[in-house]
Image (tube, rainbow, N blue to C red):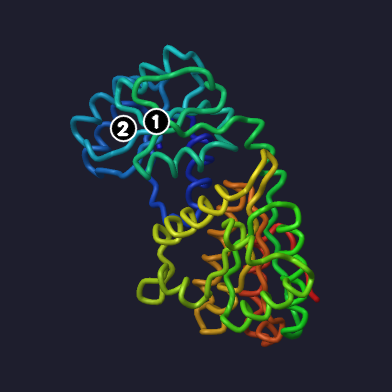
Amino acid sequence: MVDDFEPFRQFLSSSLRNTSNGFVCWEASDGLEAVHKAEELQPDLILLDIGLPKLNGIRAARQIAKVSPGSKILFVSQESSADVVQEAFRAGGLGYIVKTDAVCQLLTAVNAVLRGGSFVGSRFDGHEFTGASHVRVSDGARQKMQSARRHEAQFYSDDEGFLESFTRFIDSALRAGNAVIVLATESHRNKLLLRLQGRGLDVAAAIEQGRYVSLEAAGTLATVMVNDRLDRPRFLKLTGEIVAKAARAVKGENGRVAACGECASLLWAQGNAEAAVLLEHLWDEFAQLHGLDVLCGYVLNSFQREQENSIYERICAEHSAVSSQ
């Protein structure tokens, strides 16, 4: 991260370190130092200001492209002129956001650029920049998604409470015309199906429409785990594909995607608490980014051992709401 104002560098650093990407961060305070560090470190990503001492960000970007061609550059600057933005992309930038928008747009921009895409801050809607493409989120849409995001954890004393709560969650979403993704054990999937049919829901039609997607939890987990560790790229790829497919089945502007499951609970039951916490963190990021309704179910008995209190607290911290039934 390259900026001559130390507090802003600290903000960028803390924002990235608080994600689950495992970022290792270095800092530079002027454009010339940025070029030297880029050549030395060959970083994956460079957050680059424009108004820098010794060498401005545009000129620094051109030199970085020569000494560290694999580095992706995201400009984070107070400059808001469309001409400056265009020049930044011509210099090799893949993304551009204005500093005052960084709080709500930084992580979206970082993820887009790291995936090889590009990002233009929402205030530049209506402009087309050479080299910039496709990843734009308007302020209104972003605020709507974040305010609508729901990521709830519920703890149950038995299977009956779990099944009743999940049935109500799914029933409500389907009757509203939304799509629902269910990640549960085979036994729970079958019982949920019977309960939903007992409520008069045409589940077969919802499945055919793509609005009811039911996946076996353990098998789904196996596709995103590597050596008992949750693999973030695999999770994002799989979840992104599932959510995108469900979203296409929703009709109307106000249609939403809901998801409920017990994957994190299964990981914890297997003794892999760290993976469970990371999984919840990733789902929370996904819920915020896409405005999802997410319900995570846990059997309360598995949390009652005193030595697991710290994990329980970390699980709760990853959710927007927590309740017990």
Residue 11 lies, in percent from the top left, at 54, 40
Snapshot quadrant of residue 28: top left
Quarter of the picture holding the C terminus: bottom right
Farthest-out residue, left = 66
The answer to whether 251 appears left or right of 82 in the picture is right
Q: Earlier in the sequence, mark 1 or mark 2?
A: 2
- Residue 248 or residue 30, whichever sits in front: 248
Snapshot quadrant of residue 96: top left
- Residue 57 or residue 294, whichever sits in front: 294
Q: Which residue is mark 1?
A: 48
Question: Circle 2: is it few (<14), some (14-19), or many (20+) Cα within 10 Å?
Answer: many
Residue at the spot x=51%, y=38% of the render? 106
Q: Which residue is mark 2?
A: 34
* Residue 8 appears in the picture as rendered: yes
Residue at the spot x=63%, y=75% of the render? 310
Real-space Cα separation, disc 1 to disc 2, in angstroms: 9 Å
Secondary element at image label 2: helix
Quarter of the picture holding the N terminus: top left
Q: Amino acid at mark 2?
A: Ala
Q: Amino acid at mark 1?
A: Leu
Question: Circle 1: is it few (<14), some (14-19), or many (20+) Cα within 10 Å?
Answer: many
Q: Residues at badges 1 and 2 in contact (C-beta under 8 Å)? A: yes
Above or below, comparing residue 43 to residue 310 in the picture:
above
The answer to whether 37 appears left or right of 255 in the picture is left
Residue 61 lies, in percent from the top left, at 30, 26
Secondary element at image label 1: strand
Q: Depth-wise, is mark 1 or mark 2 nearer the camera? A: 1
Above or below, comparing residue 125 to residue 7 in the picture:
above
